[in-house]
Amino acid sequence: MTVMRGSCHCGTVQFTVTLSEGVASARRCDCSLCARRGAVAVSAAKDDITYTAGRESLTLYQFNTKVAEHYFCKICGIYTHHRRRSDPDEIGVNLACLEAQTPFLAEVLVHDGQNHPNDIGEARDAGILRFTPMKDDT
C-alpha cells in the first residue's frame, strides 16, 4: 500500500490516495474520452481517496452509459480521477497529478476501451505505449 498526495494544476483540488499496487497499475485506455484526454491512470479503491482541499471545485463529466464519473477541477480544467465503468468500486487517478510522479513511464499498457469489457464480456488490451527519453548530448 502506497499513500500519495495529489492535486490539480492550480492546487485548488488536493487529495491523498492509497494505491494498493503503487504505480504498477499504471495504464491508459483507448476509449473516445481517454484517447483525447491522454492521461495515465493508476488504480485505487473508490473509498481510498480523501480530499484535503477543494472538493467543491471538482466538476463531473459523464457520457454514454453514465456509469463512469470523470472529475475535473473547474478552475484549471485538469482531470484528477474517475470512477470506472468496468468496476464502479475502483477509481483511476491521473498519475501526473500525484507528487513526484510522471506519466512518462517506459511502457504503459493500453486497455481496449473501444470494446468495453462490460459490452463484450471480457477485458482486452489494445497495445503498449512506449516512452523513450531523448539522449542528452551536453
Image (cartoon, rainbow, N blue to C red):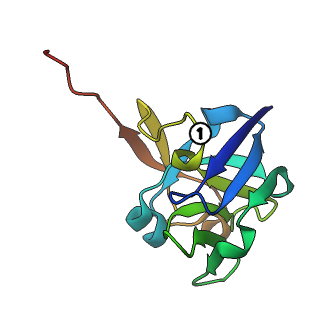
For the point 81% across and 58% down, which residue is it? Answer: 46
Residue at the image position 64 percent from the left and 48 percent from the top: 6
The correct choice, above or below, for 7 with respect to 24 in the image is below
Q: What percent of the width, then of the height, locates residue 123?
A: 62, 54
Residue occupying the point 47% across, 71% down: 33
> What is the three-letter code of the residue carrying label 1?
Glu
Screen quadrant of the C terminus: top left
Is 91 left or right of 7, judged from the image as shown? right
Of 109 and 96, which appears nearest the observer?
Answer: 96
SS of the residue at dot 1? loop
Residue picked out by circle 1: 99
Residue 119 visible, this orientation: no
- Which residue: 61% across, 67% down? 120
Q: Nearer the viewer, residue 20 or 74?
A: 74
Query: Quick one: label 1, few (<14), some, or many (20+) residues within 10 Å?
Result: few
Residue 77 visible in the picture: yes
Q: How many marks?
A: 1
